[in-house]
Each structure stands twice: as C-alpha cells, then as structure tokens.
Image: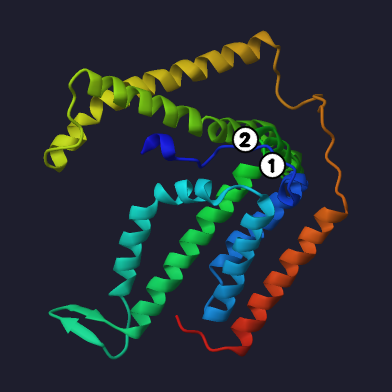
Amino acid sequence: MVRDVAFGQYFPGKSLIHKLDPRAKMVCFIAFIILIFFTFNYASLGIVAAFTAFIIIAGGISFKFYFKSLKMILFVVLITSLLNLFYGSGEPIWQWWIIKLTWAGIHRAAFVTVRIICLILASSALTFTTSPTELTDAIERLLKPLSAIHFPVHEIAMMMSLALRFVPTLLEETDKIMQAQRARGADMDSGNLLKRVKSLIPILIPLFVSAFRRAYDIATAMECRCYRGGAGRTRMKILRMQTRDYFSFVTTALMIGGVVVCNILLTSVI
C-alpha cells in the first residue's frame, strides 16, 4: 500500500500545466483552494469539479496516479462523509434512537466529499507537474515582500521544498522496512488495535533514524557546497510570465466569477 502512494512525486512532461510559470500555478492553486470552501450550491460545486477535471486533463498525467493519491486519504473521506451524513437539521427522513438522516445531512456529506476530493486532486496536479526546484523558486518569489521585515523567506521555501521532495523517498523507505520486518517474522496484519499499534514501533524507530541520517547528509552536502542561504544567490532558470500564464489568471478569474454568480443567484443548500 505504501509503495502505491504517488503524492509528492514529479512527472516531467510538456503539457500546458507543465509549461506554466510556477508562480502562476501557485497563485491559481491558492485561489482554487480558497474557492473550494465557498461553494454553497450544486452549481458552484459543479464549476469547481469541472475545473478540477480540466486541470487533470491539461496536465497530461495518467489518472491512475491521481487515484493513488486518493487511496491514502480514502478512509478519512469515508469517515468524514459518514459523520456529516448524520449531522443536519430539518425533518428526518430516517431515524434510529439519536441518529437521524436528513436531506441537509445528505447535502453536507456530498459537499464535504467532493470538496476533499477536489482538494487532493488539485494538490496532486500541482506536485505532479511542478518540480521541487520550481516550487521553491515560486514560493520564494511570492513571499519576497516579507523579507523587508526580516522574514526568512528563502529558508522557509527551502524547508518546504525539501519536505515535499522527500515524501516519496520516506514512503519507499517505510515500505522497505516493513518488508524487512515481515521477513524476520513480524506480524503486522492480525490482532487487535493495540497489537497493531505496537507492531508499528519496529517500523517507526528505523524510519526516524533513517530520516535524521538523511537530514544530516543533506546538511553536510550543503555545507560542503558553501551554501549560505538566499543572499546573493543566482538562479539557473529565470522565471518570466508569458501569455499562457496570464491566460491561467483569466481562467481562474472566470471560475471565481462563475462561483460568485451561482452563490448570489441560486439558493444555498448547505
């Protein structure tokens, strides 16, 4: 299961989303994430879902990788949907003891499910089509005004980039440790909840040791290359906005306008 997780990986390509400036992708992504939680009827939710589908198609990445990203939070989505399903006011259409099912709860569960799925798919599309180096440059450029108040912009961007870069590596390391423990006779798939939690200890300890070792190796490599932060550093690739980047802003603005119009003209269902 661990080896099937695709979130955090980068797949090189020449699609429209790959060619966008990383700053444009970051701005559009942030606007999209905020807009997801301002959908209050099915029309506005449909616009967000359609935009998510457009991003996936334009990215040119096989949907099986997006499905792998969804697998890691599928249990969370199901639990959240069930909790919201029985949380709603109004006349119950089914009731047992204190548990009741209402149309408001059904609407809320549907909205929460679609919102989480769109959030994960959009996040995956960003990481699939943007390299860690590009993400670092984009975050640093967008946060550059904060450097006027001595905010460590470059250091924060570097830490976020390294954390995202090593998600697939740590997942692969976890899978190797689990296989090694099973080869030694460890049973991780049977027993009660307490026993399964205890069986994770032989996995977590080597994983933490490996993570700290990798962090130490990275720090040593950066010191050997005389890394001193963002001051005076040059970049191999200079970011410049092009026509397609402004087109992405226009497309995002149209989506925002469509959601706002739907929220104003149509009745809210949640």
Tag of residue 164: none
Looking at the image, residue 93 sits to the left or right of residue 3; the answer is: left
Point out residue 242 in the picture as x, y percentages from the top left corner: 87, 50
Q: Nearer the viewer, residue 85 or 128?
A: 128
Residue type at mark 1: give it.
Answer: Ile
Image coords of residue 137 (percent x, y): 73, 37
- Is residue 70 positioned above or below 205 on the image? below
Find numbered disc 2 in the image and state the secondary structure of the residue it sits on. Answer: helix
Towards the viewer: 104 or 251: 251
Mark found first going from the N terminus, 1 or 2: 1
Residue extending farthest top: 224
Between the residue at mark 1 and the residue at mark 2, the CA separation in whole angstroms equals 9 Å
Q: Quadrant of the C terminus?
A: bottom left
**Kind of residue sitting beneath label 2:** Ile
Please state if 76 lies on the left or on the right of 93 as rendered: right
**Which residue is labeled 1 in the image?**
139
Q: Is residue 41 visible?
A: no
Q: Which mark is residue 156?
A: 2
- The percent position of residue 81, horizontal first and vertical second, equals 35, 66
| Residue 239 spot, x, y in % from top left | 83, 40
* Label 2 Cα crowd, 10 Å radius (few <14 / some 14-19 / many 20+): some
Structure colour scheme? rainbow
* Mark 1–mark 2 CB contact (< 8 Å): yes
